[in-house]
Image: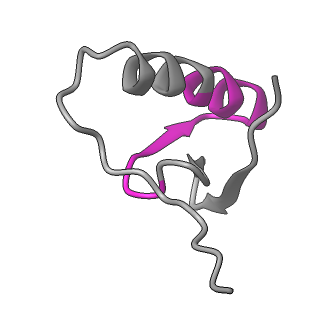
Amino acid sequence: MELKFKYWKDNNFWVGYLELFPDYWTQGKDEDELQENLRELYVELTSGELPNPIKQGILKIA
């Protein structure tokens, strides 16, 4: 499975979020750590541990 994410460098850290869950950000000291933290965030958000996480979707209009 592949998920899109957005990320950028902010001072000494890499910050990012999963496009599916744009309200939940994480960070890492380098890009590898950021990606690992994003994987962990995805597991947490989809495991049911957090009640009703906010998601992002696409609406098709005729």
> With respect to residue 51, does 47 lie above or below?
above
**Residue at the image position 68 percent from the left and 56 percent from the top:** 7
Quadrant of the frame with the C terminus: bottom right
> With respect to residue 56, does 16 lie above or below?
above
In the image, farthest residue toward the right: 2
Q: Position of residue 12 (x, y in %)?
A: 59, 50
In the image, farthest residue toward the bottom: 62
In the rendered image, residue 23 lying in the magenta stretch gets the answer yes
Total marks shown come to: 0
Q: Position of residue 48 (x, y in %)?
A: 29, 16
Residue toward you, 44 or 62: 62
Residue toward you, 25 or 21: 21
In the rendered image, residue 62 lying in the magenta stretch gets the answer no
**Residue at the image position 61 percent from the left and 34 percent from the top:** 29
Q: Position of residue 41 (x, y in %)?
A: 47, 26
User: Which contiguous range is marked in magenta?
Assistant: 22-38
**Residue at the image position 61 percent from the left and 54 percent from the top:** 19
